[in-house]
Amino acid sequence: MTDQTRWGIPEVQLKNKHKKYQKDLLEKALEFVNKMDDETLCELALVIEAEYERKYGENKAERTIL
């Protein structure tokens, strides 16, 4: 068992919690995506692409898609 008083343990735990939270969000989103029809799914894809470009910039978004 790891000594919980060592330096860096809280940071690692926080990082792991963040990863789990993001994974849980993805699983929840996929539940809803499976219920969508084609038209709504295409609209969602456009919204996601626009949000990705807003957040990370157009250049990175283009490299990721290709």
Image (cartoon, rainbow, N blue to C red):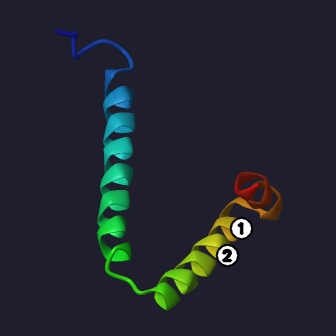
Farthest front residue in view: 38
Residue drawn at x 32%, y 21% is: 9
From what the image shows, is residue 29 above or below residue 47?
A: above
**22 left or right, relative to 61:** left
Amino acid residing under circle 2: Ala
Location of mark 2 (residue): 50
Q: Looking at the picture, how far across and down is residue 8, in whole percent? A: 39, 20
Q: Secondary structure at mark 2?
A: helix
From what the image shows, is residue 22 above or below residue 28?
A: above
Q: Secondary structure at mark 1?
A: helix
Foreground residue among 39 and 50? 39
Amino acid residing under circle 1: Glu
Query: Where, by quadrant of the figure, is residue 56 drawn?
Result: bottom right
**60 left or right, relative to 43:** right
Give the quadrant of the N terminus.
top left
Give the quadrant of the C terminus.
bottom right
How crowded pointer 1 is (Cα within 10 Å; few <14, some 14-19, many 20+) is rated as some
Check residue 64 in the rendering and tell me which mark sits there, or answer none.
none
Location of mark 1 (residue): 53
Q: Looking at the picture, how far across and down is residue 43, in whole percent? A: 56, 86
Residue drawn at x 30%, y 55% is: 24
Foreground residue among 47 and 30? 30
- Count how many numbered circles sit on residues in the image: 2
Foreground residue among 42 and 4? 42
Residue drawn at x 83%, y 58% is: 59
Q: Are marks 1 and 2 in contact (CB under 8 Å)?
A: yes
Q: Looking at the picture, how far across and down is residue 25, in whole percent? A: 34, 60
Residue drawn at x 78%, y 53% is: 63
Farthest bottom residue in view: 39
